[in-house]
Structures are given as structure tokens and as C-alpha cells.
Image: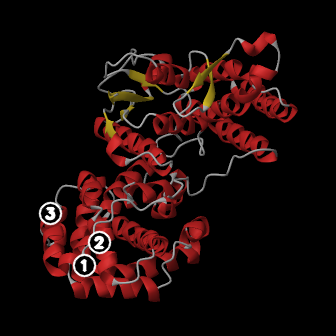
Amino acid sequence: MSLNLLDLLKGQIGSQVIKQASGFLGESESSTQSAMDGILPSLLGGLMSNASSKSGAGALFDLLGSGGHDGGIMSKLPGLLAGGDATSGFVKQGGGLLDSLFGNKVGGLVSMISSLSGLKSGSASSLLSMAAPIVMGMLGKQKSALGINNASGLASLLMSQKDHIKDALPAGFSNAMGIGSLDSITGAAQKEFGSLLAPISNVGKKTTETVSRAAGATVGTGKKVVAGAADVATDAAATGGSLLKWLLPLLAALLIGGYLLSKLGCSNPAGDMANKVTKTTTGVGGAVVDKTAGAAGAVVDKTKDAVAAGGDAVAGGLNKIKLAGGKTIDFVKGSFGDKFASYVVGSDKSVGKVFTFDNVNFATGSANLAQNPNPELDNLAAVLAAYPSVHVRLEGHTDSKGNAGSNLRLSQQRADAVKAYLLNKGVKADRLASKGFGHTKPVAKNDTEEGRAKNRRTDAVVTKK
């Protein structure tokens, strides 16, 4: 499995981090997100350049060890970005780190990010300073996870990121940093390190990372399910208007009921109703849909496993599918999992089949999965594991509201987030592709909220069987 540092970073820097950063900077969340989308690959590209020489890789290796960059910063981000002296100190510390890493190249990088996102120059500089310790923390964490104990190993790790970074790197990066292309950087590293630059392509279980929202609460089992449902309802009520005064209590009751049913061992009578409630909320607005869809999906997946034992009234709602290797999964009839698994198990050899996820949803305006862990993606990973010849392209789509360029970036980020989730479940990278289409492939008209909700989707397209 190919390790993707950029995806791991995106998974840690969620909507709450962007919201806090934008509040501190006095900039819009969309501009801050756009800037961060350019900052992360730029910083990784700059570190690649540094590590392309033995002296640069050695200095970076030493800095990771001496600077305490072990990934612990991820859990501290909410406090560091809360404003006041804590955030000012964090920005100052990050600025010093940037100077030590890139010296006089920082100014060019600031100008590029400011131009890319529309942030004021000072805001772009501060956001860069916030991002630098986060990137170094992730790099240090992976260095430890991989057992990298020398500069050449660190160089190998960074050079292995070339393709991931190249796809996301902003135009003008090479000019801003005063360096060549990523291809020339990796070529220089190969010449410098020779046989010491071992490829890092299959890092095994030890390096898997769970991509999760930086500020997202864990929604697990027991009381955490109920607490997670309450949090979602509270967030949605803040933006949903008076209609939600009756709608959200209904949703909350459904979620809690689903939890109680799961405790009693009769799981999915609430599943179809949960999906209907999700669809009902579509008319309230995109923000509510994004938040409630993940919660309703949690009920569907949480309660489905024991329906067969719950009585004849609900037993007809499941389809038991036996996979190669003997594993059996119960899918709700007509669901994404049912359709996808039935096709994979069946004799149809045609490719290009498109399957739209039911319960893969994201926080509004971000690429953070609303439900993580996500049972629908877990089941997809299990199906792909049982049929290793199947290849899939994950496709992200948005509605037509907002800026077309921003929509395209968001759709790509969401497709990448789903890909990253499956990679972390052990699906090999060469079996997965991701592509964002923005609003260019609608399945419904964008002149109604119902149509826009249908267009905001993620698809799995079978490219090889």
C-alpha cells in the first residue's frame, strides 16, 4: 500500500481547524481552505527539495528528532488555534520553523499562496506558519512508524510522495521556491543517494493511518452513538431554521431508537426510515443534509446486522451475499453495497458500471467524512479484498452553486478522501483511482434543492473486473 502523506494531512486538517484559522486571520473559510489546499503540497514539495541532497536530508532528519515533531501536535490543534496568545505563539513558532526550512524562499511561497487564494499577504504568511509544524509533525510520525533511522530513509519517504504531490501542487510552485520540477528533484536525489534511495512502496500494516477529522468527535458504540447523534442535531439546528424544531427531534429519536434496537439485538427496522428522514431534510438546505446524512447513515449501518433475527416483518429487507473466501455480508436491498457486491459476485464482466454511495457524506464545504469509521466503505473494502481483480475509480461531484473552480477542487478532495479511507483499509493503491468533476456531470436539475442534493454525490466506477 502506497503511503500518501498529503491525504493523511488532509484527513487531520478538518473543517473545524479551517474555521478556527479563518477566524484568527479574519478571512473567509473558503479562502482559507483554498490557501491550505495549496500550502500542504507546497510544503511537502519544499521538503522534497531539501531532502534531495545528503546535507539537506541530514539537517531535516536532525530537525525532526530535536524539534519534537512526533505527531503529538495533531491533538493540540483546537487549543493552539483558539485565539489569543496561544495562537500568536503558535504562528511565531511556525514562522521560525519555516525560516529554518526554507530561508529566503518563504517570501515567494507567501506571494504564491496569497495570489492563489485571495488571502492578504499577512494572512497567507500566518497560515503557512500554522501549517509548517503540522506537516513536520505528520512527517515525524511516519518516520517513527516506518522505523526510519537515517537521512537516506527519510529522503526515500519524501521522494515516494512525488506523484501524490505533483497532482495537487499549485501552478508557479517551482518559480516561487526557486527550484526545479519534482521530477528533477527526485532525479537529483537518486544521483545523490544512489542505491541508498530505496523505494518505499509497501509499508504494511504498521504505517496505516486512520484519516479522521481533526476536531470530529468519535462516534462509536454505546453512549457515544447517542452523543454523536445529539452533536449532529445541535450543529444542524444552529443553521437549519425553524423547520428543524420538529424535524431534528424526530431524527434524534430515530437515532437513539436505532441504538436501543442494536443493544437489544434486533438491528435494522430503522434503516429505511433513517434514509427517508435524511432525504426529507434535503429541502432544508445543503448544510443540514451534509450533517444529518452521516448521522442517519450511522443508524442504517449500525442497525442492519441483526435484522435477520428480528422477525419476518423485516427479514425481507436484507440480501445476504457470500463473497469469495466464504465471508457473508448482509446488505440492505437496493443499497449501494447490495448493488455493488451483487455485480462483483455475478457473471457480468462489463466495466464502466457506476454505483452511487448511499452513506458517504461530508461536512459542509469540506472533504471530511461526516461518518468515520464508515461502515459502507468498510463493506466496500471487504468486497474488494475478496475480489482482488476488481479496480475502482472514485468520482466526486458537486451541485452548481458557488465557484466552479472551488467546486472542482472540492469534488477532487472528496474523491481523494474516499480513496484514502480505502487505502487505509488495505486496498492496494494500483486498484484505486480518484477524479473530481465538480458540477459538470449532474444527474438532476440544479434549479431545486432536491436536484442539487442528488448532484452532490460520490460514485464508485468499476474500471476493471
Above or below, 356 against 115 in this view is above
Amino acid residing under circle 2: Ser
> Can residue 295 be seen?
yes
Amino acid residing under circle 1: Leu
Above or below, 117 against 103 in this view is above
Name the residue carrying label 1: 196
- Quarter of the figure that contains the N terminus: bottom left
Q: Are marks 2 and 3 in contact (CB under 8 Å)?
A: no
Q: Secondary structure at mark 1?
A: helix
Q: Earlier in the sequence, mark 3 or mark 1?
A: 3
Instruction: Give me the residue at 33% from left, 69% from top.
Output: 157
Instruction: Give me the residue at 20% from left, 76% from top.
Output: 195
> Can residue 393 be seen?
no
Name the residue carrying label 2: 156
Real-space Cα separation, disc 2 to disc 3, in angstroms: 14 Å
Q: Secondary structure at mark 3?
A: helix
For the residue pair 154 and 247, the one nearer the viewer reads as 154
Instruction: Give me the residue at 87% from left, 31% from top.
Output: 264
Dot 1 crowding, Cα within 10 Å, few <14, some 14–19, many 20+: some
For the residue pair 373 and 397, the one nearer the viewer reads as 373
Dot 2 crowding, Cα within 10 Å, few <14, some 14–19, many 20+: many
- Asked which quadrant contains residue 16, the reply is bottom right
Q: Which label is found at residue 183?
A: 3
Real-space Cα separation, disc 3 to disc 1, in angstroms: 18 Å
Above or below, 283 against 9 in this view is above
For the residue pair 78 and 45, the one nearer the viewer reads as 45
